[in-house]
Amino acid sequence: GLLATAGVATSEAVHVAVAAAGLAALFAAVPVAFTVVRVVGAAYLIYLGVQTLRHRRDVPDAAPAGVPGRRAYLNGLLTNLLNPKMVTFTIAFLPQFIDPGLGHVWAQFAILGAVLIALEFLVDGTVGVLAGRIGDWLRRRRTAQRRLNTAVGTLFIGLGVRLAAER
């Protein structure tokens, strides 16, 4: 839950820093750079989908001990860091609100980025906590959990394939 959310927030800080450093200009000048991010992100989504499908029938009887903190953090970090949609969103979104005429462009990026990260942490953290509560319900309904695992795995693979096929 919250450690994965912290990983997502950390990766968003990287996206904000990259936007501030002008990666948007790099992607425009060197389209292959974005293609690399897109393909790596697609491969990671497909990997997550395949792993979910491979283990969809592994329905635990009891609540899992939990993903170790470091692993949860790294999962959140990598999932968001390699998500080209988030890279694109951050690079396209934040600069719209920067006014070079006001000076201190880095400070403007830092403030806007901090607000974005705080809001993202609040929303993602809330979703993570609620998902934990739903997990208790799903553990009592093994068929529902298997179906959900199948749907999520298939969705991740589909998103990865779609992302890889985009131009």
Image: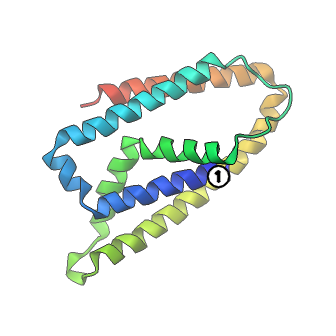
Q: Position of residue 110 (x, y in %)?
A: 39, 72
**Side (left or right) of 50 relative to 81:** right
- Residue at 47% x, 23% y is 157
Look at mark 1 in the image and give the residue it sits on: 3
Q: Position of residue 34 (x, y in %)?
A: 26, 41
Is residue 63 depicted above or below 110 in this figure?
above
Q: For the C terminus, give its image quadrant.
A: top left
Q: Secondary structure at mark 1?
A: helix
- Residue at 47% x, 30% y is 45
Is residue 81 depicted above or below 142 in this figure?
below
- Visible residue check, residue 93: no
Say which of 159 and 48 sits in front: 48
Say which of 118 and 7 sits in front: 7
- Residue at 65% x, 24% y is 149
Q: Position of residue 10 (x, y in %)?
A: 50, 57
Farthest residue, direction bottom: 102
**Side (left or right) of 157 relative to 85:** right
Count of marks, rendered view: 1
Residue type beneath disc 1: Leu
Q: Position of residue 29 (x, y in %)?
A: 13, 48
Is residue 129 depicted above or below 162 in this figure?
below
State the image quarter where residue 30 is shown.
Answer: top left
- Visible residue check, residue 101: yes
**Side (left or right) of 79 relative to 30:** right
